Amino acid sequence: MAAGYSYGFSGYGVVLFATLQILEIKRIANSMKRRHLLSASATLTSGLLMTDPALSAQPRAHSNSSALVGQEHWATRQAEGESIKLFMWRKPPLTTAKSPNKGVILFVHGSSMAGTPVFDLQVPAKPQYSTMDHFAKLGFDTWCLDNEGYGRSSKSRAINFNISNGADDLAAVSEYILKTTGQKQLMLYGLSSGALKAALFAERFPERVSRIALDAFVWTGEGSPTLQNRRKRIADWTAGNKRAIDRAMIQSIFTRDHPGTADMDVVNAFADAILKLDSEVPTGSYVDMSINLPVCQPEKLLAPVMIMRGQFDGIANIQDLLNYFAKLPNPDKRFVVMPGIAHSSLHEKNLAIVMRVLEGFFEQPKPVYVG
């Protein structure tokens, strides 16, 4: 499948990266007061750890003169003799002669909620919290989905809807999206277990993926305080295919690592949107992240990759992520540490940093010279 693969669309923005010494990463880790510091003798090549204060600048402003209207779409795949219906939500790009369509971004949700609460969150007087609106106004064709077992998608099968099953969903919806849009490839953003699903899908279908951003990602789980606590309840997660969610559980996403990273009106709007769609969610990704890691193989991820790590995020130890990063084969790769951010970056106070980082990555064109 990789034979016809190219490492990017033409027309996406460019930064060329120099070799980074692990000593610099160690300095940053010290400034973050995190444990498990990096070996001074190690070296990462062809990557960049971005902690430039300039990243805190506001992302580009958009005109609100044109309203963005969402579109409902459905894809179907076959599994175990059943037709699985998968809900998709699209915000088409606002394009002009000076701002052409910049390509497709597919956003992939995590373990405890469906797609639209994460990526098209509507908060009164705070329109910046709709990631899909933000990128549609920049000229991107934005899509998200509800994985099987979540939101409006099928929930009938007696399984726990694990990460591999989620990657199967991405195979089906990506085929639909590429056919609908006429594009040859798409870009991916995955958050938390959504990053695992996105990476696994990209390993299986490299020819469909031009760029992939993995936020709140984890590889082996070694040194993760969040997963260490989650393993204490593994008997609960393996006892059934569903787990209950409520407002307190959703609020804990924003307090378990470092309280204060998000505004309560945003957290409450997020909880409202999630609970309108689901009162229980599958256990599969919790089981996988607790006892079945690793589920992804970096050597098989051929597209340009950006690893995004919130300063306070407890889902992964920074060394675990750097070990994964070092094994990625494509020289077009970035490792970004986002200051003042915990696990749910798109809903926190430092959202502007996240948007700036993603804009630069998704608009990067393929290099003129590759050696």
Image: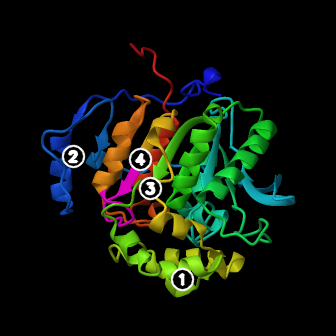
Q: Which residue is mark 3?
A: 217
Q: Which residue is mark 2?
A: 25
| Residue 307: assigned label | 4
Residue type (three-letter) at the residue carrying disc 2: Ile
- Give the quarter of the figure containing the N terminus: top right
Are the two marked residues, 4 and 2, in contact with CB atoms closer than 8 angstroms?
Answer: no
Q: CA distance from mark 4 to mark 1?
A: 31 Å
| Residue 165 located within the stretch drawn in magenta | no
Among numbered discs 4 and 1, the one appearing first in the sequence: 1
Residue type (three-letter) at the residue carrying disc 4: Ile
Q: Is residue 287 above or below residue 278?
A: above
Secondary structure beneath dot 4 equals: strand
Q: CA distance from mark 4 to mark 2?
A: 14 Å
Residue type (three-letter) at the residue carrying disc 3: Phe
Are the two marked residues, 3 and 4, in contact with CB atoms closer than 8 angstroms?
Answer: yes
Frontmost residue, 355 versus 230: 230
Secondary structure beneath dot 2 equals: helix
Quarter occupied by residue 11: top right
